[in-house]
Amino acid sequence: MLSKEALEEFKAIYKKEYNEDISDEDALEMAVNLLNMMNAIYRPIPKKWLDELEEKDGLVK
C-alpha cells in the first residue's frame, strides 16, 4: 500500500505530465502497476559485469 503522501506525489506528477486530474483510486491502481512493473524488470547489475565492462572499455574505477 502506498502512503497518502506518495499517492499525492504520484497524482501531482501525473497532472504535470498529462495535464489531467485523476482520482485516488485510479492513481493507486496506476502507481501499484508501475511499481509492480519496475519490480519485475529492474535488477541490479552484478559487480562482476561492471568490472568486465570497465576492463573492456579501459575505464578506470
Image (cartoon, grey):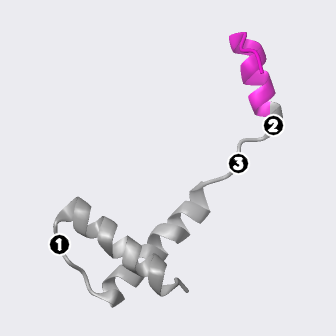
Question: Disc 3 marks which amino acid?
Answer: Pro
Using residue 14 as the reference point, say whether residue 8 is left or right of it.
right
Q: Nearer the viewer, residue 33 or 14?
A: 14
Q: In the picture shown, does residue 13 fall above or below 22? A: above
Q: Quadrant of the N terminus?
A: bottom right
State the residue at coordinates (29%, 68%): 14
- Identify the residue at image location x=59%, y=62%: 40
Q: Nearer the viewer, mark 1 or mark 2?
A: 1
**What residue is pinned by disc 1?**
20
Disc 1 or 3, which lies upstream in sequence?
A: 1
Q: Is residue 40 magenta?
A: no
Residue 41 position within the rendered picture, expressed as x and y whole percent measured from the top left:
58, 56
Left or right of 45: which side holds 23? left
Which quadrant of the rendered structure holds the C terminus? top right
Q: Which-is-in-front pick, marks 1 and 3?
A: 1
Indicate the secondary structure of the residue bearing disc 3: loop
Label 2 and label 3: CA atoms lie apart by: 9 Å
* Amino acid at dot 1: Glu
Number of dots carrying numbers: 3
SS category of the residue bearing label 2:
helix
Q: Where does the magenta region start and end?
A: 49-61
Label 1 crowd (10 A; few <14 / some 14-19 / many >=20): few
Residue 47 x/y as whole percent? 81, 37
The residue that disc 3 covers is: 44
Question: Within 10 Å of the Cα at label 3, are there few (<14), some (14-19), or many (20+) other Cα atoms?
Answer: few
Classify mark 1: helix, strand or loop: loop
Q: Report, in whole angstroms, how far the alpha carbon at label 1 lies from the one at label 3.
A: 34 Å
Quadrant for residue 16, please give it: bottom left
Question: Residue at the spot x=32%, y=75% of the render?
Answer: 11
- The residue located at (32%, 65%) in the rendering is 13
Q: Which residue is mark 2?
A: 47
